Amino acid sequence: LLAPYVGMSLYSWTTIIAVVLAGLTIGHWIGGRAGQRAITGATTDEQFIGRSRRVIFTFLILAALASLATLFLLRLVSAWALPRFDPISAIGLITFACFFLPSLFVGGVSPVLTLIAIKSRADSGATIGHMYAMGAAGAIVGTLLTGLVFISLLGSTTTVLSIAVLYGLLALLFAGNILRRGVAVLVVLLVPSLSAGGLSGLSNPCHEESQYYCIRVDDLRFGPAAARVMALDHLGHGVNLRDFPRRFHSPYVQLIDELVFRRTGGNAFSGFLLGGGAYTLPRAWLAGDKAHRLVMAEIDPAVTNTAIDKLWFKPDERIRIIHQDARVALGREKGPFDIIVGDAFTDIGIPPHLVTREFHDLVKARLTPVGLYVINAVDRKRRPKFALSLAATLQQSFTYVTLWLPEAELGGSDSRTTWVIAASDKPFGANRLRARQGSDTSWRGISAGRLAKVFEDVKPVILTDDFTPVNRLLSGLLLSRELAE
């Protein structure tokens, strides 16, 4: 639910877990107090159970309505918070506004149920243990079904609607009179009727929800050229022009193509690509008749299918696609490859296991002696803590490491940009590149050692499997108002 607005990252995972646990915790406390009042005000067991049923009914109805409201609040609060706050604060505000109350209301149910169970059984210790075990088992089953079945089968919006209906049906079990039964039936009917009404608050921003991403493809126009952009979660991951597969919209993608061309001399090469996205680079490289040998590691089959169905990517016998984690896939390949490209990084969603010294040793082992490894990273222009740390880590495995930027971006404000880092045991031979075609863009390459002297106050960190503080290194970038906007 959060991914289309704030992406999928350590920050969103941490915040959603903390907010839901906070809601459940306070809900448990409120539910325990409500249950105690039901005991105190009752003179008989029947009266206590009747009072408790009303409390449970109220919690379940409020949980159903709060769950339904989540789908509306998510859009309203996101539109308000994202332009006003840095990304981390915005994630916290959106998550709290949308998911705290549903967790609180459903958290109030189990203490009251536990009191009822204790009242009706002699062995209170075993009863409490039984209720805790059932609660944990329900959480496990719900997690597995949601992650493995419901999201990919129903989509997140329909899953939330189903939960709201389920809460309403459960409330019916505790509705003791006609009025409360009517309220529960109204809630159960309200949810699907709102969904069928096609209200904008319930529209799903994803064209497809896979087990990994919210995928969306939108049409664009570049003059007379038809184009489409693929968005994964909240960010665009590539633009493809229908009739011009070798025309690149993103300067960093064009730079990677230029670096590969300079290293291979325009001849056929073997390459391994980490991350598919819109499949822009393999689409460009397969557009000619060169006998390339490409292997693509894309973890999500839905991304590949979308690129084929909607982004004009036409795979042939020159490319083999592996739907697997890139590090696992590369480890199983024998190689050697002339080129390895790492393009699995976008914004705050950086897989830490793909930037460590151990992974770079694996990359080097799969390259030819003069092979080239190219990777992109989003960071600041004037204090690139993560990019410098990534370059310093690459120097542990490769002799020559160079960081590239468009010449037009050298100097100026400390805004974010996409660095391209090239590593090899063969020198690059030039520190300036001009686009061969399609634009007048030029790039400047700066060695990692020279760039470290320019930013003497930025101390790089050697990234390892044991210590990869990517989020800390990027914290300045993440907290910038410019990124939020």
Image (cartoon, rainbow, N blue to C red):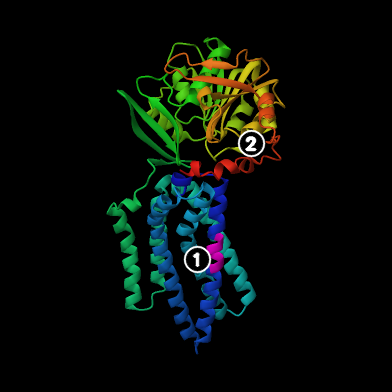
Query: Badge 1: how crowded within 10 Å, few (<14), some, or many (20+)?
Result: many
- Residue 265, horizontal then vertical, whole percent: 55, 9
Q: Which residue is mark 2?
A: 385
* Residue 457 sits above or below residue 118 on the image: above
Relative placement, left or right, of 147 versus 200 is right
Q: Using residue 181 as the reference point, say whether residue 433 is left or right of it.
A: right
Quarter-of-image position of residue 234:
top left
Q: How far is the residue under mark 2 from the one under mark 1? A: 40 Å
Q: Is residue 316 visible?
A: no
Q: Say which residue appears at 38% left-offset and 70% top-offset.
A: 172
Q: Residue furthest left?
A: 197
Of the pair 110 and 419, the residue shown nearer to us: 419
- In this view, 308 is above or below 73: above
Can residue 367 be seen here? The reply is yes
Residue occupying the point 45% across, 70% down: 59
Q: Position of residue 395 (x, y in %)?
A: 70, 26
Secondary element under disc 2, as helix, strand or loop, is: helix
The overriding secondary structure of the stretch rendered in magenta is helix
Q: For the residue marked with disc 2, what is the amino acid? A: Lys
Residue 88 position within the rendered picture, expressed as x and y whole percent measured from the top left:
54, 49
In reply to whether residue 22 is colored magenta, the answer given is: yes
Identify the residue at image location x=39%, y=64%: 65
Residue identified by numbered label 1: 104
Report x, y in % for residue 278: 44, 29
- Which circle, 2 or 1, is nearer the viewer? 2
Instruction: Give the quadrant of the C terminus.
Output: top left
Q: Which residues are magenta?
A: 21-26
Q: Residue 448: which quarter of the image?
A: top right
